[in-house]
């Protein structure tokens, strides 16, 4: 066994090189299973972050279906999802660049069949009796946008022979989840209106399909503008199921003889926030039981639910003993369940579970590298007191490296992070990015602040009108609590985050004195700009998070960190994608200009070709290397990595001020 070396926290030599973030890495998305064959999407940093459709044959041979240069992705609602349809021999993929749908003729040979115009499609299903697809369309044609002031979403039918598109349902601001009954006579779908996000309130609609293929007698059977319905799905015997939260938790229900019945009542979330299309959190087994992912206490569990046999009965629930704490995208092929799975000590896989025996196999690994367990920091779910006598949640990762320890009496620097959304949740599975920090001697706290999902409706509702307050308070409270417990250094604390978490980061730096540095990835600095510049899906989001605009204009002004940059006193690293349409580069530039004007230490990196989330190898490696250099310079130690030092404007001047010395030009 190698001798354990003594080195300051943050300066440990890590077994995880920065290149491990992308080296032979694929991001596994949306697995699907049928007839012994498996499909999934692979996001490949080595191909500029493009998503590639892969098929796994019964003999385990992997076949690439989309050609090089093609990106199997959609931008409907900007965040996309459900960009692939597999139905027997029919395989359809969306072209991220053009928005057109393409039929896979044979491996790496595609045939586009939708019109050449500014339309995008997502969440397509196959209606074989009518030789068509039913999908959500987002119309970006200039005349449509000019007439409506924004692009228009519809539920449409697409003729597979001609590519002709006809509208089935229109008039709502958003549509999702068209689902055809097993006898193909009835269609269910979701729709909702501004200013709602899906979790604010959706309507589950039902209609008979007429002889001409149109929708007859459409009606709302569940949900409203204030009740969230998600993931409608038909059982094989033709009973419509869906997730709803009348008890305060997102549980399963079914529509039987014109009434809604509970399937299972649990203190757990059986569906998550609908940021993308195509989520699949439950599926039906051959014997009529239901396989479902349930989230509580910051982790996922896989359950087998036996539905009640009569009204008033409670469904039976049987958990599986699995090592995974993050699971998604369930697909069933008989008694085989295929899903995306991550354990705290192992990277992502496409997993296959034999439901009858409990045996699990890995069909595809996101990375070929298996970490030594002694180098992996296992998250501990923590609860800590926060503002107003409330309790907040998070995952705490202590510094972990089998070859190093810190000098006696030294406490580790802390990096606080939080999820985006802001309606999302902390990730409890193995994340290379977090392990890159912990293995170098940092402690990490991933905060599930008030507003996060996975803790019930009341916890999620804490953020209403309070974004920039509750999330910031909880991040601050978590950092202070860890210092009070003697687990981290209270004088070396950084906060980082991307998107909504980037806003929380900037707000924490502007409105509190808790943190000593911060890194924001495509974070929002001026809330007014988000109202004017963002995409349709989120264009009214801030009405629930902040308040209606312009009636509550003062709140927007008070909580916009870039308008209060004079209150930022510590170094900031700003990283931004040049093609970002969710938080445009102009937002980052506003922040940087404000920091520059106030001579606050900062660095700004703009990544050409990247949008809301970095996907290419070069951007991922460069962004993380810059962050490591940034913290090392601010906290005053030399990183073990051979990385190019980041140029930080005004850092020497700031250090001189901190030391009470005269600054030099």
Image (spheres, rainbow, N blue to C red):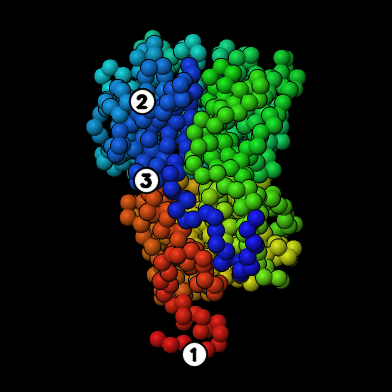
Residue at point 36% right, 41% down? Answer: 50
Q: Secondary structure at mark 3?
A: helix
> How much space separates mark 3 and mark 1, taking CA atoms?
48 Å
Q: CA distance from mark 2 to mark 3?
A: 24 Å
Can residue 209 be seen in this snapshot? yes
For the point 43% across and 64% down, which residue is it? 643
Q: Which mark is residue 662?
A: 1
The quarter of the picture where residue 132 lies is top left
Q: Nearer the viewer, residue 349 or 127?
A: 349
The residue tagged 3 is: 46
Q: Secondary structure at mark 1?
A: loop
Residue labelled with disc 2? 92
Foreground residue among 539 and 420:
420
Work out whether residue 33 or residue 510 is closer to the camera in this orientation and state it. Answer: 33
Farthest-out residue, bottom: 662
Q: Find the residue positioned furthest to the front.
A: 1
């Amino acid at each position: 066994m190698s001798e354990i070396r003594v080195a300051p926290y943050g300066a440990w030599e890590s077994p995880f090189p920065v290149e491990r973030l992308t080296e032979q890495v694929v991001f596994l998305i949306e697995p699907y299973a049928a007839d012994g064959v498996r499909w999934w999407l692979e996001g490949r940093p080595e191909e500029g972050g493009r998503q590639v459709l892969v098929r796994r044959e019964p003999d385990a041979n992997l076949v690439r279906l989309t050609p090089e240069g093609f990106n199997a992705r959609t931008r409907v609602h900007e965040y996309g999802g459900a960009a692939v349809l597999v139905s027997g021999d029919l395989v359809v993929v969306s072209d991220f660049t053009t928005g057109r749908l393409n039929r896979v003729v044979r491996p790496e040979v595609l045939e586009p069949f939708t019109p050449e115009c500014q339309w995008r499609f997502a969440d397509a299903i196959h209606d074989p009796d009518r030789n068509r697809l039913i999908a959500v369309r987002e119309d970006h044609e200039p005349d449509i946008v000019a007439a409506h002031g924004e692009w228009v979403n519809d539920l449409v039918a697409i003729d597979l022979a001609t590519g002709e598109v006809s509208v089935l349902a229109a008039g709502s601001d958003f549509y999702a989840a068209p689902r055809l009954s097993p006898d193909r006579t009835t269609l269910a779908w979701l729709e909702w209106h501004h200013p709602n996000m899906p979790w604010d309130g959706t309507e589950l609609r039902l209609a008979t399909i007429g002889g001409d293929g149109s929708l007859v007698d459409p009606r709302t059977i569940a949900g409203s503008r204030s009740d969230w319905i998600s993931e409608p799905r038909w059982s094989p015997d033709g009973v419509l199921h869906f997730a709803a939260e009348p008890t305060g938790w997102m549980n399963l229900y079914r529509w039987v003889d014109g009434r809604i019945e509970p399937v299972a009542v649990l203190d757990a979330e059986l569906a998550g926030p609908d940021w993308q299309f195509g989520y699949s959190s439950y599926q039906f087994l051959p014997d009529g039981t239901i396989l479902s992912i349930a989230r509580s206490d910051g982790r996922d569990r896989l359950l087998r639910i036996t539905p009640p046999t009569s009204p008033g009965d409670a469904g039976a629930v049987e958990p599986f003993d699995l090592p995974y704490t993050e699971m998604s995208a369930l697909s069933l092929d008989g008694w085989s369940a295929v899903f995306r799975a991550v354990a705290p000590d192992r990277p992502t896989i496409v997993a296959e579970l034999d439901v009858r025996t409990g045996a699990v196999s890995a069909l595809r690994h996101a990375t070929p590298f298996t970490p030594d367990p002694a180098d992996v920091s296992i998250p501990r779910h923590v609860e800590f007191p926060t503002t107003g006598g409330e309790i907040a949640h998070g995952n705490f990762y202590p510094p972990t490296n089998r070859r190093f320890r810190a000098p006696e009496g030294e406490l580790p620097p802390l990096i606080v992070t939080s999820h985006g959304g802001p309606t999302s949740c902390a990730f409890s599975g193995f994340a290379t990015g977090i392990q890159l920090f912990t293995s170098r001697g940092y402690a990490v706290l991933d905060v599930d602040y008030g507003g996060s999902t996975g803790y019930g409706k009341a916890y999620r509702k804490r953020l209403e009108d309070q974004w920039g307050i509750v999330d910031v308070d909880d991040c601050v409270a978590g950092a202070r609590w860890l210092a009070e417990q003697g687990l981290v250094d209270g004088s070396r604390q950084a906060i980082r985050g991307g998107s909504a978490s980037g806003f929380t980061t900037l707000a924490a730096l502007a409105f509190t004195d808790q943190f000593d540095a911060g890194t924001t990835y495509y974070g929002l600095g001026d809330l007014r700009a988000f109202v004017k510049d963002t995409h349709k899906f989120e264009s009214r989001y801030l009405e629930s998070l902040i308040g209606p605009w312009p009636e509550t204009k003062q709140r927007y002004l008070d909580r916009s960190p870039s308008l209060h940059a004079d209150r930022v006193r510590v170094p900031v690293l700003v990283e931004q994608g040049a093609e970002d349409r969710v938080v445009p580069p102009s937002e980052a530039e506003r922040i940087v200009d404000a920091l520059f004007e106030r001579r606050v230490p900062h660095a700004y990196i703009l990544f050409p070709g990247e949008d809301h989330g970095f996907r290419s190898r070069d951007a991922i490696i460069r962004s993380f290397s810059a962050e490591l250099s940034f913290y090392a310079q601010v906290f005053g130690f030399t990183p073990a990595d051979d990385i190019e030092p980041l140029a930080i404007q005004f850092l020497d001047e700031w250090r001189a001020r901190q030391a009470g010395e005269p600054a030099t030009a």
